[in-house]
Every structure is written in C-alpha cells, then in structure tokens.
Image: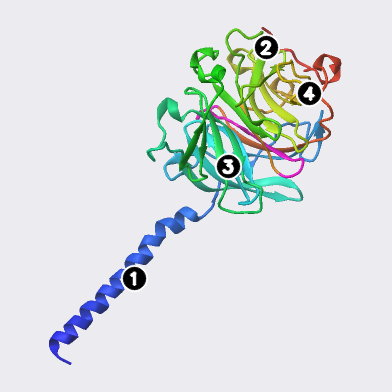
Amino acid sequence: MSEATAVARSAALVAAMLGALAAILATIPATMAAQPLEVSQPYRLSPHVAPGESHMGIRLLGSVELASTAMEGLMLGGLSGLAWDEDESRLYALSDTGALFHLRPHFHKGRLVRVQLLAAFPLRDHHNRALQGRRADAEGLELRHGNNGKTGDSLVAVSFERHPRIVLFKPDGRYVETLRLPADLADAGRYDSPNKGLESLTWLPQTGFLTAPERPLTGAAEGIVSLFALDGRSWHYPLLVTPKASLVDMQALPDGSLMTLERGHGLMFLPIVISLHHTRVTAENAGQRLPVTNLAILDSSQGWSVDNFEGLTRHREGTFFMVSDDNFSTLQKTLLVYFEPLNPGDPGDRSNSPEFEPRHQIPR
C-alpha cells in the first residue's frame, strides 16, 4: 500500500467516524426533548370532598397542580383550552399565549394521579411564523379526527379572543385553514370588550362547530350569551346569576347535548365561583333561550380551593378534564381536575331546580 493510499484511507476513516459522531450528537437534543417531564403534584380541591366522592351532580376523580415548566422555550401556564386525542393517547392544552402543549395523564384505579409534559409547540400563521401579541390570544380548543382509529390525521381548532377568529392547526402548531365566521362574530365591535372574544369552542353533529363569546354581545339581553354555529344560527344561553358571570367553555356530550363551564367572582376575584351546567342545542330551539340545569357549583367561600377554570374536555365515555388559567401569576395555580357527571339528565329551567342554586350569593 502506498503512502498516499494509506493517508487517503485514514482520512476516509476519520471522516466516517466524525460523520457518525455528528449523527449521534444531532440526535441528543431530539432525544432529550422527547423525554417526558413530570410536571404535577397532587392537589386537594376541598377538605370536605375527597377523590372518589360526589358533590352535587359530579364525582371527583382526582386533581393535580401543574408546575410552571418550560419546554422548547414555551412556559406551561395560562391554559384556557383542553382537547383529548384518543388516537394519540394525549391531552392537548392550549395557552393564551398561543402555545399548544401535549400532556399525558396517568391514572390509578380510575383516578388522575400525575401528568407528564410530552411536547410543546407555538401556533403558527400561514407564513409559518409563530403567533405573537394579541393575535396569539388563543382561548377555545376543539379536536377533529381524534377518535377515528387513525394516527397522524388529528386537527385542532382554536378560537381566538382579541382578534376573533377560528383557525385549524396541526397538533405541532402548523397552520391549516381559517374558518369563516358569521357576520355577528366577525364584527369586533359587537363584543363586550376586546378581551371578551371567542372564549368557547366545541363541535356537535347537529351544528358542526359551535362557538361563543365570554360575555353577551353588545345589544343583547343582560346575562344572555349567544352560542353560534358557523352557518349563522344562534341559541341564547342564560348565565348563572352572579356578578361578572362568564361562559368560559363548553363541551359536547355523547348524546349531542352540552356541558358548559361558567366562572363568576366578586371584588378582587373573591369569592370565585366555578359552575358546571347542562343544556341541549337542537335545530328546533335555534333562536330561543336554552333550558339549563346545574350540575355542580364550586364556591371558594364554601371551602373550595378553586382557581380561574377556563378549559373543559371529555376524556372517555362519561369522564372529563377541567383546567385553570393561572395568568402566569405566582398568586394563582394551574389545576387539572378529573371528574364525571353523575347524571346530566334533561335540561330544564334553572329556576325550577332550587336545590342546585348556589349556597352563597356573591355580594354586588
């Protein structure tokens, strides 16, 4: 073997070794990012109601507090929307800073015990730029194609508040499509304030996407929030009679009815009242006031350690997740609660169900 040949072979060997090392090093960040992060600790919502016990019309099945953990430069917090992907076995959580987190809840004997953070992605516009500022103020979350037995085809629908719109994304945050809104919702001047836009989003077989602002539109009757299908049909939803009551999320039930989540509070957010309700939207009651029944009321003045709950989604069969928005404040918590309704029943007039009225009326 000539000296030149030996040098060439040595150079080739070194190059191959360096290439292999570079390939290994290139996989390290991806491998590290793929490692789930433990982000939860147990949390007790009430000293009087333990996990597995019932309160009014729901049974609590565990709750945890999520840590303010960063992944891919995105802070886990400000969560305002949830969606369960059965095909991918993960829970999506939406931040009002325009970030989408992938979570994996863990259960023991049917109760939520801990949560892992799997991935985090910024929502992106049609130019593949991460959403910024007011255009990133995401609130409502709904999943499509998440329970069809196929992986890789899920889409997340997101409703936005300060710039009202509904946009479809891939679960990694890539932009897919912006949906057309009815005229009443497309007009930003119709909202109670710039921060009271499209808070809730769900999907029903009889309506398709169904969305709603947090507070009544200007000119609407006091305490009545209109739920809108994208074809323009609307339904009039009566809020719970507490000051500053808001509709913060809604979720379809297997029978095509709706569970709704409301938040009310007094001065300086004390007390805070979180309430769950049941109603039914049909083609026949479009344009009418909806009948509503109360499922449960969690009132901080009654010992409930609740926070600013804004996100709701169905898990499997009759179980649900609910999450709070900590507003990235050290004074608040991100709480994830797992529960099941005992029997939603047929919604009727709230005034005919005095046993479900709040035990504490917030002073005006």
Q: At label 2, which amino acid type do we have? A: Gly
Query: Please, what secondary structure does the residue beneath circle 1 have?
Result: helix
Please name the residue that numbered disc 2 is placed on: 223
Q: Residues within 10 Å of mark 4 (few under 14, many from 20)?
A: many
Measured Cα–Cα span from mark 4 to mark 3: 27 Å
Percent x, y for residue 139?
A: 55, 29
Q: Residues within 10 Å of mark 1 (few under 14, many from 20)?
A: few
Q: Is residue 174 visible?
A: yes
Residue closest to the eye, 282 or 226: 282
Q: Earlier in the sequence, mark 1 or mark 3?
A: 1
Please name the residue that numbered disc 4 is placed on: 294
Q: Earlier in the sequence, mark 3 or mark 2?
A: 3
Query: Which quadrant would the C terminus be assigned to in this image?
Result: top right
Please name the residue that numbered disc 3 is placed on: 92
Please name the residue that numbered disc 1 is placed on: 20
Query: Which quadrant would the N terminus be assigned to in this image?
Result: bottom left
Q: Earlier in the sequence, mark 1 or mark 2?
A: 1
Mark 2 or 4: in front is 2
Labelled pair 2, 4 in contact (Cβ < 8 Å): no
The quarter of the picture where residue 22 lies is: bottom left
Q: Which contiguous range is marked in magenta?
A: 316-331
Measured Cα–Cα span from mark 1 to mark 2: 66 Å
Q: Residues within 10 Å of mark 2 (few under 14, many from 20)?
A: many
